[in-house]
Image (tube, rainbow, N blue to C red):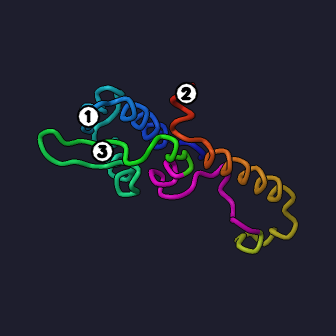
Amino acid sequence: MLITRASEYAILSLILLSKAEAPMDSDTLSKELSISKSFLAKILQSMAKAQILNSYKGVNGGFTLNKDPKEIDMLSVASCVEGKAPTVFECAPSLEDCPSEKASTCTIWPFLHRLQGKIDLFLANLTLADLLDD
């Protein structure tokens, strides 16, 4: 699946954090977005580990953006929270890697591979700043 709930929640969190004047904790963010705190906490930690967010402990702790919104691309965000790059289809990255005995006769793989490349490029060029401008 291309964009799952995890990616959606990550993007919504980034939008809120970009507008915040102080760190926001997962409890505040989950209430603001009306989503599960435990699920969101995992997403936020993934983004902190990927250095998209800063994580602060303590009473006034929480999360802030670690980068300028122009430097946060949606391919990186989706890849970090999903654990892999988002895909349009579940298929081998090359015909040689295809587990099917019919790989040599697959007529749709070249089209899907080109489509995936265009989507990857689009997401790599789409930044948080672009989403804030809309």
Tell me how far mark 2 sits from mark 3, CA to CA.
Answer: 26 Å
Tell me how far mark 1 sits from mark 2, CA to CA.
Answer: 21 Å
Q: 98 and 35: which one is in front?
A: 35
Q: Which mark sits nearer the N-terminus, 2 or 3?
A: 3
Is disc 2 surrounded by few (<14), some (14 to 19) or many (20+) residues within 10 Å? Answer: few
* Predominant secondary structure, magenta span: loop
Q: Secondary structure at mark 3?
A: helix
* Tag 3 near tag 1, CB within 8 Å: no
In x, y percent, where is residue 26? 27, 38
Numbered disc in front, either 3 or 1: 1
Q: In the rendered image, which residue does mark 3 sit on?
A: 41
Q: In the rendered image, which residue does mark 1 sit on?
A: 22
* Tag 1 near tag 2, CB within 8 Å: no
Q: In the orientation shown, which residue stands out farthest toward the left?
A: 59
Is disc 3 surrounded by few (<14), some (14 to 19) or many (20+) residues within 10 Å? Answer: some
In x, y percent, where is residue 15? 43, 32
In x, y percent, where is residue 4? 52, 42
Residue 113, quarter of the rendered image: bottom right
Instruction: Identify which amino acid the numbered label 1 is placed on.
Output: Ala
Q: Which mark sits nearer the N-terminus, 1 or 2?
A: 1
Q: Secondary structure at mark 1?
A: loop
Q: In the rendered image, which residue does mark 2 sit on?
A: 133
Q: 62 and 71: which one is in front?
A: 71
Residue drawn at x 44%, y 51% is: 81
Residue drawn at x 82%, y 53% is: 111
Is disc 1 surrounded by few (<14), some (14 to 19) or many (20+) residues within 10 Å? Answer: few
Q: Which residues are magenta?
A: 76-94
Instruction: Identify which amino acid the numbered label 3 is placed on.
Output: Ala
